[in-house]
Amino acid sequence: MPQEIFSIQRFFTILRTVTHSTFLKRERKRTKALHPDTPSHRDSLLAYKKVELVARLRKEQTRQTELETQYGTLLQDYVQKDVKIAELEAEQARHREHLEGLRLTLQRQEHPGK
């Protein structure tokens, strides 16, 4: 029995040595450096609590909804302006045709022989 206690104590001593070994600490750091996809403890978002993160998320979702509404309104305004421009260009073309017809009529009246 005393020998079992000794071996258990020896086991825990070795375990403690292994976990606190500076060589193994360096190895763990090196292994962490090889896997950068794991989140760093210095990541600013990891410092927040869940409640704070949810509040920030909701605030950002509200802001995004407002921006989408603004962009929709701007898009609608641009489409209406494009339609108005097309209407004005069509009206301008009709006026040009009418003026061209008047010009030809005046030329015929002034120079009937041609």
Image (spheres, helix red, strand yellow):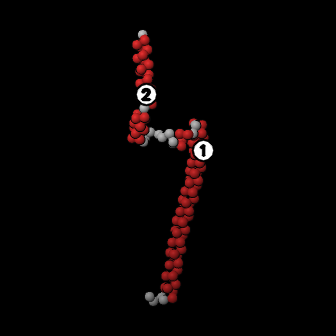
**Is label 2 in a helix, a strand or a loop?**
helix
Q: Position of residue 41 (x, y in %)?
A: 50, 39
Is the residue marked by circle 2 packed among few (<14), some (14-19), or many (20+) residues within 10 Å?
Answer: few
Q: Residue at x 51, y 42 (%)?
A: 42
Q: Nearer the viewer, residue 48 or 6?
A: 6
Left or right? Give the position of 50 relative to 17. Answer: right
Q: Position of residue 114 (x, y in %)?
A: 44, 88
Q: Position of residue 113 (x, y in %)?
A: 45, 89
Answer yes or no: is residue 17 visible. yes
Q: Quadrant of the N terminus?
A: top left
Q: Amino acid at mark 2?
A: Thr
Is 66 placed above or below 93 here? above
**Is label 1 in a helix, a strand or a loop?**
helix
Q: Are marks 2 and 1 in contact (CB under 8 Å)?
A: no
Q: Amino acid at mark 1?
A: Lys
**In which image quadrant can residue 85 be found?**
bottom right
- For the residues labelled 2 and 1, the Cα–Cα distance comes to 49 Å
Q: Residue at x 57, y 39 (%)?
A: 48
Q: Which mark is residue 17?
A: 2
Q: Position of residue 57 (x, y in %)?
A: 57, 42
Q: Nearer the viewer, residue 96 or 23?
A: 23
Q: Which mark is residue 59?
A: 1
Answer yes or no: is residue 65 visible. no
